[in-house]
Image (tube, rainbow, N blue to C red):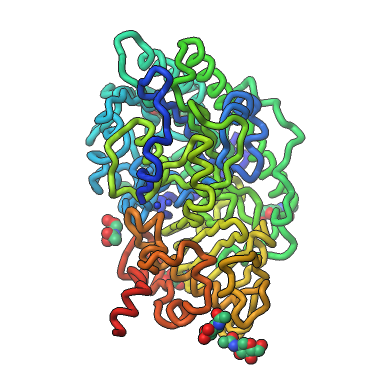
Amino acid sequence: MAFWRLVCLLVSMYSAGCSLAFAADDAQQPLTAGGKKPNIVFILTDDQDLHMDSLSYMPLLKKQLTDHGTSFRRHYCTVALCCPSRVSLWTGKAAHNTNVTDLNPPYGGYPKFVSEGFNEAYLPLWLQDAGYNTYYVGKLFNAQRVDNYNAPHAAGWTGSDFLLDPYTYEYLNATFQRNHDEPVSYEGQYSTDVLAKKAYGFLEDALGDEHEKPFFLTVAPTAPHSNVHINVRKVDGDFTEKTATQAPPVPAERHKHLFEDVKVPRTPHFNPDEPNGVSWISRLPQQNETNVEFNDDFYRNRLRALQVVDEIVDEVISRLDKAGVLDDTYVFYSTDNGYHIGQHRLQPGKQCAYEEDINIPLIVRGPGVPKGEVAEIVTSHTDLAPTFMQLAGAKLRDDLDGAAIPLTAGALGAEKGTRQEHVNVEMWGIIMSEGKYGSVLYPNHTYKALRVVGEEYSFLYTVWCSGEHELYDLKKDPYEVNNLYPASQETLAVDALDFPSTSGSTAGLANNTTADTVQLRRLISRLDTLLVVLKTCKARECTHPWEILHPLGDVRDLKDALSARFDEFYEVQQERVYFTQCEKGYIAESEGPMGARSYGMVHEMAL
Ligand SMILES: *[C@@H]1O[C@H](CO)[C@@H](O)[C@H](O)[C@H]1NC(C)=O
Ligand SMILES: *[C@@H]1O[C@H](CO)[C@@H](O)[C@H](O)[C@H]1NC(C)=O
Ligand SMILES: *[C@@H]1O[C@H](CO)[C@@H](O)[C@H](O)[C@H]1NC(C)=O
Ligand SMILES: *[C@@H]1O[C@H](CO)[C@@H](O)[C@H](O)[C@H]1NC(C)=O
Ligand SMILES: *[C@@H]1O[C@H](CO)[C@@H](O)[C@H](O)[C@H]1NC(C)=O
Ligand SMILES: *[C@@H]1O[C@H](CO)[C@@H](O)[C@H](O)[C@H]1NC(C)=O
């Protein structure tokens, strides 16, 4: 059985995801036909990718959600690691505002969520205030353990049945903990099947006669996360060594035989001949055949593990339908963060700012949601809490970092071209890889990243704690293999980039270059300054950062900011993003500028 075994030290598993546009259109979300508040079902998987095609292997999800709803193909997590991403999702706040940045204490995990005060201020409590019954089954956070689940209990759930560490990722030996009961071990049973039964039970409770209230039900299986077994060994009496064995996810018996010929998509950045990326990624060796075969098998087991989730989607829809409430219910499908296998030569894992890890599935069906559509607007996990609250008619809060996602054709149309074009992605600490060959732990995986996805341009800009930078032009380089960040200041001054020229407001772009190029110096100064604002933004600043930089309101996106008249403002007056050292958590003193100058303000001060 243990013919291979990856042991990665769990040194506490160091490692390390914007505004309030509720008001955009308060009336955009219809109440259901009967004038009642809608029900919401949220299916939240763990580590599911969008870019390795996992959705193509879920036919029931396609039939019940994709074909009946809208896919938000530019949906991003704001931190590509389970626990920080989930805390951002449930609080509506960026990781730099939750300071839950890791899986375990001192920088993360359930205890940090509690000590930061969020067990008194997060989504389920707000939904209960809005008159909802709330239910949760599955994994809520990491480090919600068999020995701390009741100190205190997670607040806000009418009914809950949580997966607890250290058994959360044991597909065949899960421990669940229901309401305020003792934890129960399900040794030998298939975790996702156990979870499915519990989910249907809560659905029955929610639909029961005694409940006139609308409900919010989250179904959060472990799939397709790797199987993690924690080994505990006493060394020298007092010292306990904990190690984790990270194996491919275990499929249900009935799905074991599926997809025998399927492999990780061989995109141009899959195990490339030439290394790319910066820092430790650029030094990764190319994977040999044995390694690639192992990872393909890992991939197949992810797809197999997702089959039970596919069944759950189908069964949930069919039960809603039978109960006659399907037309009064929104069903959301997403995951906590994405996943990579072999791209950029990386072993299986997440935590990078590359597209595989941050651009994730979000599919929504429900009253008024266009059927079979693909939305192009940019959305992120910090937008989900505001979205659920808006649907629930909950009291608006002005301290959330996201904005409600438009769900009707009218609202989607209205926000096309006006909604934010950026996502701020953060990460702190150690990166862990998974699988047989994934034992490499890199300690300085701390970075600030910015994705800008405009109508005519698409960039990823990353600043690492080591001082290294990455810049990718995804319009030309969708696989992010050609780092455009200049090696030296001299090239920075002369390098230019083709840039879409459109009629209208691009005059500034053309200054001193041809109409179709923008100097990298100019582009980078704008991206960097935007990142200065976003890495410490709060509330509306996070969705409307240009308002901070240009209080007069004359700059609304990157294109506006590229005007040559702002060269001095961006290139000279602003501080750059930098770190003074690599930290394992959010240590503000090590993170350089804590805000940017405003254009108007500088002007005033000069006067
Ligand atoms: C399964 O989990 C229980 C605790 O819930 C533990 O006592 C038992 O040893 C585990 N079994 C295996 C085979 O790991
Ligand atoms: C393939 O690569 C792995 C990981 O580096 C190594 O352990 C293994 O020995 C290699 N196998 C062969 C046949 O070269
Ligand atoms: C070009 O840039 C210079 C200096 O940055 C400025 O003085 C000039 O007005 C700009 N021209 C246009 C057409 O924007
Ligand atoms: C503008 O272009 C000219 C000629 O290509 C070049 O010599 C000059 O340095 C450029 N000026 C700036 C501010 O980039
Ligand atoms: C990690 O960062 C620390 C502090 O910035 C530095 O001293 C150390 O050499 C770095 N380690 C690696 C492996 O890059
Ligand atoms: C985040 O939490 C860590 C650990 O408790 C603490 O050391 C750090 O100062 C906090 N950061 C901020 C910005 O509050």
Instruction: Mark yes or no: residue 595 visible.
Output: yes
Residue 242 visible, this orientation:
no
Question: Which quadrant of the picture is home to ligand 5?
Answer: bottom left
Q: Is residue 282 left or right of residue 211?
A: right
Looking at the image, residue 115 lies above or below residue 424: above
Instruction: Pick out the residue farthest to the front.
Output: 504
Residue at position x 65%, y 68% from top? 499
Horizontal and vertical percent position of residue 107: 33, 53
Instruction: Name the outermost residue toward the top.
Output: 209
Number of numbered discs overlaid on the protein picture: 0
Splitting the image into 4 quarters, where does residue 14 fall? bottom left
Q: Looking at this view, is 303 or 500 the one in front?
A: 500
Rendering coords of residue 525 (x, y %): 49, 74
Does 2 sit above or below residue 81? Answer: above
Question: What residue is shown at x 31% (from left), y 14% (from top)?
Answer: 211
* Picture quadrant of residue 497: bottom right
Q: Is residue 525 above or below residue 26?
A: below
Q: Nearer the viewer, residue 85 or 142?
A: 85
In the rendered image, residue 8, in percent from the top left (x then y), is placed at: 49, 50
Q: Is residue 587 left or right of residue 290?
A: left
Write the residue at 47% across / 42% down. Answer: 336
- Vertical side of 516 occupied by 435: above or below: above
